[in-house]
Image (cartoon, grey):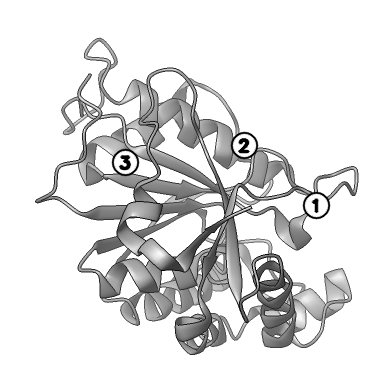
Amino acid sequence: MNNSLDKDRKVALAVVAHPDDVEFLCAGTLALLKQKGWQIELVTMTAGDCGTRELSPEKISNIRKAEAAKSAELLDADYHCLEFRDVFIMYDQPSLRKVIKLIRQVQPTLVLTMSPSCYMVDHEMTSKLVQTATFAAGMANISTEDASPYFNVPYLYYMDPMEGKNKFGDMIEPGFVVDISDVIDTKKEMLKCHDSQRQWLLDHHGMDQYLETMKQFSSERGEMVGVEFGEGFRQHLGHGYPQENILGTELDEAVHQI
């Protein structure tokens, strides 16, 4: 497999579990890549059909997909939902084929996805599915309708877990932090698009001040490397994956190693 970066193809794909995960965890980094001329693709596994206490799954899903699409527009990005259901993202053959097909269709140079260890299994399953799909997309004997094998294993990065900690409460240190101070307003505007979730998080998580919570965590990550706001990542460096840090190359001085 050819793992070298195609300099003429700069496509960054973010695959997250739910609408608003991008905005909390990687929107700033995507905004910086956009400034560098990258094409941005945003994908959620689910439409967030359980993010309410009052609305039907269909109604809240339509609302949340519209919110995600509105947010994506701020990066001139395409948004797509793979139509899994909340809490039912499974690591099985049908799910893998769906994510493999996505990788083959988008043909990304780099992929950002959820942390392998997080408070919610949906996040962890998304991470596992994306890990396998990025490697398996080039396996010709795996068939996917209307999508041919993609023979370049993309650069793969894991975002921070929510609140920076795993399910045991242990803090997860990122491998590096991207300085997003210059684009924090873009990140904030993207998160503001998700109006439906403020009350849901208040009711279910006891989480108020939606925007301030995002800014606080971004500030904490920034403090790790002496900048105002940051987003943390770990790179997948297993066998067969690109070993150089393309985010470091593309974003240069904005990337700070821990």
Q: Which mark is residue 102?
A: 3
Q: Residue furthest top?
A: 141
- The secondary element bearing badge 1 is classed as loop
- State the CA–CA distance, disc 1 to disc 3: 29 Å
Q: Is residue 216 left or right of residue 203?
A: left
The residue shown at (32%, 79%) is: 73
Q: Which mark is residue 165?
A: 1
Q: Which mark is residue 125?
A: 2
- State the CA–CA distance, disc 3 to disc 2: 16 Å
| Residue 143 horizontal/vertical position (percent) | 25, 19
How many other residues sit within 10 Å of disc 3, few (<14), some (14-19) or many (≥20)?
Answer: many
Residue type at tag 3: Leu
Residue type at tag 2: Met
Quarter-wise, where is residue 192 in the image? bottom right
Q: Examine the rendered structure and indicate whether residue 251 appears above or below residue 54.
A: above
The residue shown at (59%, 86%) is: 195
- The secondary element bearing badge 3 is classed as helix
Residue type at tag 1: Lys
**Is 189 in front, or is 63?**
189
Q: Examine the rendered structure and indicate whether residue 181 appears above or below residue 153.
A: below
| Residue 216 horizontal/vertical position (percent) | 74, 79
| Residue 175 horizontal/vertical position (percent) | 60, 47
2 vs 1, front mark: 1
- Sequence-wise, the earlier of marks 3 and 2 is 3
- State the CA–CA distance, disc 2 to disc 1: 17 Å
Q: Is residue 55 left or right of residue 184?
A: right
How many other residues sit within 10 Å of disc 2, few (<14), some (14-19) or many (≥20)?
Answer: many
1 vs 3, front mark: 1
How many other residues sit within 10 Å of disc 1, few (<14), some (14-19) or many (≥20)?
Answer: some
Label count reads 3
